[in-house]
Image: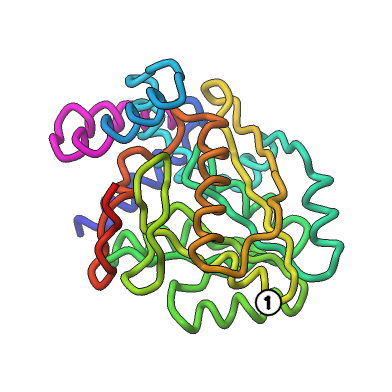
Amino acid sequence: MRKLLLKLSLNMIAMLPLALVQLFGASLGFLAYISSKQYRSLFRPQYEAVVTARNLPFKLWEAVRASGMLFSDSLWIWRNPQKSLHLVEVQNWDVVESAINEGHGLVMLTPHLGGFEIIPRVLAQHFPATILYRPSRQAWLNEVVEEGRAYPNMHFVPTNLNGVRQMTRALTRGEAIGILPDQVPSGGEGVWVPFFGRPAYTTPLPARLANRNNTPVVMFTAKRKGLGKGWLMQATRLSPLSEDATVSAAELNVAIENAVLVAPEQFIWSYNRYKHPAGAELPPKN
């Protein structure tokens, strides 16, 4: 009953205008930061280290507010796909068209920034996309996410061998695949390379898939515009990634850093990008 009420509540919230839903998300961001010491211990050091190293303005509360909007944006996009598409401004679409027209498929990278959930929906208006995702450990939450992400021309596959095989087949058909490149992979599936100056366990999967058939790799961002104003979606084609797993993972992290710096306050700083997954070798010492 509790799960049902929660799902109904989320559906009711998503029926509100985007501006109100984003304000709700912002309040959740503030609440999480103020009430959870663990949340603060992850959020502030990661955010502060990056903006300090890059000589950027320190906008902690703006970042805290935006962290809650990551959730509210996703919820609203899931429940209002057509309205969402009308609120996205797409730049550099010629980059995407040029890449997909080469006939080798497309590796789509979308970090957890702003309204990132809108990106595969934009692409799905033009060609099929197979997207890798990590199921939640909580069954009810996984059900909410899967229901919300369901959309024509979008096919979600789990982060396992079968999922990777399906993505390989999609590329062979000349279709797009999507990967969240800033997630920490499971132990044994990544390598330790720098991310904003610290060793981070990183997946070499995008390079491995792209290099099978000379597939273009494009990094996407969806920067949140003003309150209730939607998102600015931008695409940047990456140079071919190295065949070497460690080198390609380092190249990938540089590309993610550049994407984060498009809107640093809108990145998911509450996520422990530097955690040591079970089964992974120890990180190198600085």
Query: Which residue is at 62% across, 72% downward?
Result: 209
Residue 44: quarter of image: top left
**Magenta stretch contains residue 65:** no
Disc 1: which residue: 212
> Can I make out residue 79 in this image?
no
User: Which residue is found at the position 24% from the left and 39% from the top?
Assistant: 42
Q: Is residue 25 magenta?
A: yes
Query: Which residue is drawn at the image coordinates 35% and 63% (left, top)?
Result: 142
**Of the pair 71 and 41, the residue shown nearer to us:** 41
- Foreground pick, 145 / 164: 164
Q: Is residue 8 left or right of residue 247?
A: left
Q: Nearer the viewer, residue 242 or 59?
A: 242
Q: Residue furthest front?
A: 286
Q: Which residues are magenta?
A: 21-43
Task: Pick the quarter of the image with the N terminus.
Answer: bottom left
Residue 2 in percent (x, y) is at: 19, 55
Relative image position of residue 36 (x, y in whole percent) = 15, 35
The quadrant in which residue 214 appears is bottom right
| In this picture, residue 221 sits left or right of residue 35 | right
Looking at the picture, how far across and down is residue 176, in whole percent? 69, 65
SS category of the residue bearing label 1: loop
Q: Is residue 54 above or below residue 211?
A: above
Query: What residue is shown at x 56% (from left), y 68% (from top)?
Result: 244
Q: Amino acid at mark 1?
A: Arg
